[in-house]
Image: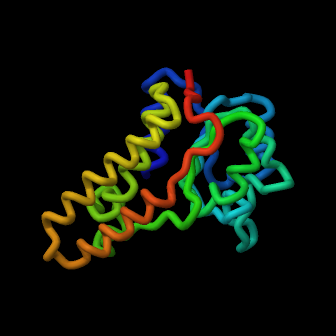
Amino acid sequence: MYTKELVKFAEKSGKRVNFLERPNLTQEKFSQVIKKQQPPLVLFNGHGSNTTIFGDKIAGAEEPLVQEDVNHNLLEGRLTYARACSAAASVGKVAVKSSGCFIGYKNLFQWWTDEKWHGNPAKDKTAQLFLEPTNSLAKALIKGKTAKDAANVFVSESKKNILHLLRKGSENGALASVMLLWSNIDAQVVLGDEQMSYS
């Protein structure tokens, strides 16, 4: 739901979009699109580890899209944002060592959900506290903001949500959400050229 919102936003902004989703979220398909289309901006929404950004599940196992020392060079020279756990710890660093910029998380990116909205995430106000700031970061990149400025949008919106929760401190789960939001802020890093932008 949050990814499709970004696709619509980019299309309305007149940007060309290559949106990979199941069953096309494979390393082979991703590599083909990158090599053929040469997109200057790459956005990931999925699982990650220190050395890998994952795509779809194939035969029960998560398909690696980008792997350190395998195909990380696909991101070289590009502006990349990965809403994926821990990808900035290593694979993001290696990918933009020569050129480009990688915005991501050096540790886990975490959020809570409200179980009563499990089938309708658009109405889940709890998840929105964590995911809307990430979408705002991506939208800032699509609008042409620098990597550093876009990352600051995420920090600013996350802090606003922290203040909102602190005012509701007695509500069940509010302080736990504050801790996760702060952890996400602390985990975010901008690697490579902070002044890079998508034009």
Query: Seen in the image, is 92 located left or right of residue 124?
Result: right
Identify the image quadrant of residue 65: bottom right
Q: Position of residue 135 (x, y in %)?
A: 42, 45
Along the line of sight, which residue is nearer the eye, 77 or 35?
77
Residue 71, percent across and down?
A: 83, 49
In the rendered image, the vertical position of residue 193 relative to residue 63, given as above or below: above
Q: Is residue 8 visible?
A: no
Q: Position of residue 63 (x, y in %)?
A: 74, 62
Where is residue 82? Give x, y as percent. 58, 50
**Residue 185 vs residue 175: left or right?**
right
Residue drawn at x 19%, y 65% as measured from the top left: 166
Residue at image location 75% in from the left, 42% down from the top: 97
**Which residue is situated farthest in the right direction here?**
70
Observer-nearest of 53 and 30: 53
Residue 22 seen: yes
Residue name at image x 75 percent, y 59 percent:
64
* Residue 5 in the figure: left or right of residue 93: left
Front position in the image: 184 or 53? 184
In which quarter of the view is residue 89 placed? bottom right
